[in-house]
Image (tube, rainbow, N blue to C red):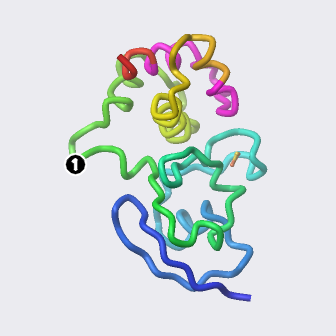
Amino acid sequence: ETVDISLVINGTAYERSVDARTTVLDLLREELDLTGTKVGCNHGQCGACTVLMNGTRVNSCLLLAAMADGARITTIEGLASGIGELHPMQAAFLEHDGFQCGYCTPGQIVSAIGCVKEGHATSEAEIREYMSGNLCRCGAYKGITEAIIEARD
Ligand code: FES
């Protein structure tokens, strides 16, 4: 079964017919070539696939594209205001070494923006709790937390 959807991704409007089982993650990576959003577990456990839907963070591997019909999606590609620019959260991750191999970083940064936007960055403990769904196998958690504190202030 296919479903017709229209959604806005990083400010660009898209209309697509997708299989009803297509996830937003698959739509982004396989159909729209927006490969900045990463695939980790594909089961809602790791956070690598995090995007913002209408400003709220979601695991795009668990979200059916059909359910995102009419939504506004923001991915890592949509954060900076222009070529050669960085979003303040991206700059803070760079400054505080909030990554090592970098695979989880797009999801971490998108989640970090959700953390601040949703008002869950008031303390280090609260940040760590909010960010606990974003796994980093290199263990860059200290830098990630510091980056969020810097970008928050
Ligand atoms: Fe979506 Fe792991 S790939 S949470």
Q: How many marks?
A: 1
Give the SS element for disc 1: loop
The part of the image, by quadrant, that contains residue 17 is bottom right
**Magenta region:** 130-148
Figure check: 124 above or below 8: above
Q: Is residue 28 located in the magenta-colored stretch of the structure?
A: no
Identified at 43% across, 76% down, the residue is 14
Residue under circle 1? 82
Where does residue 112 sit, x and y in percent of width and height?
50, 31
- Majority SS type along the magenta span: helix
Figure check: 19 above or below 146: below
Outermost residue, front side: 119
Identified at 68% across, 81% down, the residue is 19
Identified at 51% across, 64% down, the residue is 71
Figure check: 143 above or below 53: above
The part of the image, by quadrant, that contains residue 88 is top left
Q: Quadrant of the N terminus?
A: bottom right
- The reply, left or right, for residue 86 in relation to residue 122 is left
Q: Residues within 10 Å of mark 1 (few under 14, many from 20)?
A: few
Q: Quadrant of the C terminus?
A: top left
Most foreground residue, 132 or 69: 69
Where does residue 21 sit, x and y in percent of width and height?
74, 74
- The reply, left or right, for residue 110 in relation to residue 81 is right
Most foreground residue, 21 or 99: 21
Where does residue 117 sit, x and y in percent of width and height?
46, 34
Q: Is residue 140 located in the magenta-colored stretch of the structure?
A: yes
- The reply, left or right, for residue 134 in relation to residue 43 is left
Q: Disc 1 marks which amino acid?
A: Gly
Figure check: 18 above or below 74: below
